[in-house]
Amino acid sequence: MVSVFTMTNRLALERSPYLRQHQDNPVDWYPWGEEALGLAVQLGRPLLVSIGYSACHWCHVMAHESFDDPAIAALMNDSFVCVKVDREERPDVDAICMEACQQMTGHGGWPLNVFLTPEQQPFFAGTYFPPGQRQGMVSWTMVLQAIAEAWAGRPADVRAQAAELSATLGRSVRAKQDSTAVTTDDLNQAITALHAGFDKRWGGFGGAPKFPPHCVLEFLLASERVEALEMAAVTLREMASGGIYDQLGGGFARYAVDGTWTIPHFEKMLYDNALLARSYLRAWQRTGEQRFVEVCCETLDFVLLELLDPQGGFCSALDADSEGVEGKFYAWYADQLCTALGDEELAAEAVRYFGVTDRGNFDGLNVLEARGGAAPERLTEIRRKLFEARAPRVRPGLDDKRLTCWNALMVAALADAGAVLGRADYIQAAERCATVLLAGGELRRTGEIPAFLDDYGYLIEALVVLYEATFEPRWYHDATRLANEMIKRFGDAEEGGFFTTPAGASVLVARRKDLEDAPIPSGSSAAAFALLRLARLAGSVEYEQWALSVLRAHGPLAVRHPGAFGWLLRAIAFWLADAREVAIVGEVSGGSLSAAVRAEYRPHIVLAGSADGEDGGVPLLEQRGLLDGLPTAYVCERFACQAPVTDVDALLALL
């Protein structure tokens, strides 16, 4: 053996909580990097790359069953260079390994375990493996032994197989620009296709497990089609009533294991809550349903309470497990709930409203839902008492890793909600977080890891939203600086669009381009939408052309598969709508003119403003003066403007 396990392996010094969770495994783990890659070449051993994330339940299971087992660890250490990867830190490694797994097995997921040649070419992949044979599943021990024997006995054959597979990786996401332009009719067809697969009773798309369709919701909420709004509203209504939503503390779990949003996979991710908070805000603006804005605020308040870090950024996730049991923190026995409330009448109301039974709906316990009819008059008191009774329980683990991309999503959510609802605390939190993300010069994903495309795309859009919410020119200028960097570092000058990794970065087998918006926007879609919006503030043809190169490359595919391309469809809708620019001078953000613009959800508008009449270097504000000394609004389309107005009703007539 090359190294001898003593007390901890190399992961003890890593920043990632997920990697540190494996520091006491008897596996001789390396983090992804030159040391591990060089050692594989030096020894002529395959790389065993095991990928997961801190809140992944089955990652924990495989760790306890196999990676903590000294005999299994010895098999791993004797034949492979073992590498642990946090998929949230290294989406590039995860993406290429996941593509290899899907090509080899037809499916994917986490934990993801991939074997690569010393030259980093994948040749075998799978997800969860039990330590011994179980229910027709091959054991991890058998996999290790078979691959070790194949490498020892037939290395040339293994290398040939790996080379053949590697030649195909990345091709499916390097589409060239399509000359076929996507039209409004195509977007309508996409909505029709979504409606055909829509769950009319419970909302969402498909059966179990059911994930919140973040990107599709944004596309639907931006549409004027009645059935689009209905699909979004039903989905949001049912999710907020189900167990996937924490009925006591706010915030959404990652997905439901069933088709009714009842039993969640209990991990709470920052990105889910950022994206859903915006969707609930937009749904409230579109429908006026009070519960939607309540859920928006409860979700943001949950994040500020439980995921805010001391510097003003946000942690990545809360684990699904506590005390080694999934969901233990959140679920209730019926008698626990009644004891916590004390008052029999109050308990009876809670039991009815939350659907609590002695049998339970989750391993004999109850995951609380809000489907028991009208809310009790004393619901606020019930929730407060139960929240306080739950608080002393052992809490799920916190992944305190700060990811730029997910933090950017939260900046946008807070800034949007703060501007629309007049919540200065939300805007202040967004500004603090943006300041943290931009500190230190070069943008990073987390720690010392350079930023990827999604970090840039998400943050540019977030800074545009923050500028619109505050009228502070610094956020606009930071957005343009990052846009210029993104084009330089990630832009494909030959075929258009953007690569996931920056120029000059080490790549696994292929330099990929993001494609699907699932479960969150791809880097390509995020970059395109951000550049389209920024172009309207900056009057930049370059930004617009780079965005259009993404739309042309993937737009036709998005129309054919709308469930997987919601954010890109949202960007296409913005482009086709001939979005308008609104410039307001002479009033602070939140004044009567800007408040009128925000009173409804206007998905195809960008907003600029100046309280002192100075343009602040924002092109949309250049040469905009006050009319009769009053706060004045200019409504423009591609920088061709209507006559300025000072009256709210006159402004609304132009929108």
Image (cartoon, rainbow, N blue to C red):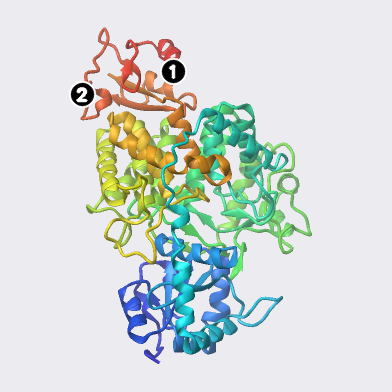
Please name the residue shown 71% across and 76% down the image: 135
Judging depth in this view, the residue of 39 and 288 nearest the camera is 39
Q: Quadrant of residue 17?
A: bottom left
Residue 166 visible from this viewpoint: yes
Foreground of the two, 296 or 580: 580
Q: Position of residue 353 (x, y in %)?
A: 72, 44
- Is disc 1 placed on a helix, strand or loop? loop
Q: Where is residue 177 in the image (x, y as percent from the top left)?
A: 41, 43
Residue 293, visible in the rendered structure = no
Residue marked by disc 1 = 655
Instruction: Provide residue 526's location: percent of width, then percent of height.
Output: 41, 44
From the image, tell me which residue sits under label 2: 614
Q: In front of the other: label 1 or label 2?
A: 1
Q: How far apart are marks 1 and 2 (CA)?
A: 24 Å
Which amino acid, mark 2?
A: Glu
Sequence-first disc among 1 and 2: 2
- Going by the numbered disc 1, the residue's amino acid type is Leu
On screen, residue 546 versus residue 347, left or right, reads left
**Which secondary structure, mark 2?**
loop
46 sits to left or right of 642? right
Report the quarter where the N terminus lies: bottom left
Residue 19 vertical position relative to residue 296 in the rendered view, above or below: below
